[in-house]
Image (spheres, rainbow, N blue to C red):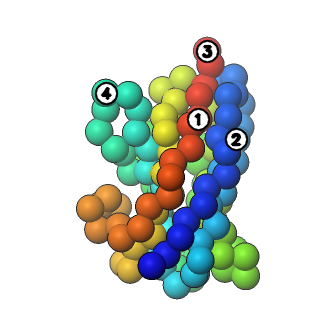
Amino acid sequence: QVQLVESEGGVVQAGGSLRLSCTASTSTYAMGWFRQAPGKEREFVAVVEWTGSSTSYGDSVKGRFTISRDNAKNTVYLQMNTLKPEDTAVYYCAASTIFTEMSRLYNYWGQGTQVTVSS
């Protein structure tokens, strides 16, 4: 069993930045971020392989978001820059035994944290 604890999100103005973190009880998993806006399906945001050597991003966040991890702290980060109102969603971190963008292949999920971007 892997426990995932996310940092608080927040409210930020469009064009601003916010960093989310997720602390896990272990570091040997690929870690992903997903988000879900009201009335929409869960969307892949980013994933980092467990060594940190590989990353992948959803098309809507490429060039704006950066995922990274510090395995000494069992923590993964999502740095979000140039935020847009359409980035407003509940953000979830998740752990998977494989490096994947598919949410159904993630074994463990955090509780979710709200990010709101005001225009």
Q: Mark 3 or mark 4, which is nearer to you?
A: 4
Q: Mark 2 or mark 1, which is nearer to you?
A: 1
The reply to whether residue 81 is visible in this rendering is: no
Identify the mark nearer the N-term, 2 or 3: 2
Going by the image, does 104 lie left or right of 45? left
**Who's the residue at 29% across and 39% down the image?**
41
Residue 39's disc is: 4
| Label 3: element kind | loop
Q: Is residue 83 above or below residue 63?
A: above
* Amino acid type at image mark 3: Ser
| Label 1: element kind | strand
Residue 119's disc is: 3
Q: Are marks 2 and 3 in contact (CB under 8 Å)?
A: no
Label 3: how many Cα within 10 Å (few below 14, some 14–19, many 20+): few
Residue 8 at x, y = what percent? 67, 45
Label 2: how many Cα within 10 Å (few below 14, some 14–19, many 20+): some
The reply to whether residue 98 is visible in this rendering is: yes
Q: Are marks 2 and 1 in contact (CB under 8 Å)?
A: yes
Identify the mark nearer the N-term, 3 or 4: 4
Identify the mark nearer the N-term, 4 or 1: 4
**Who's the residue at 53% across and 70% down the image?**
3
Q: Residue furthest top?
A: 119
- Quadrant of image for the N terminus: bottom left
The residue labelled by disc 1 is: 115
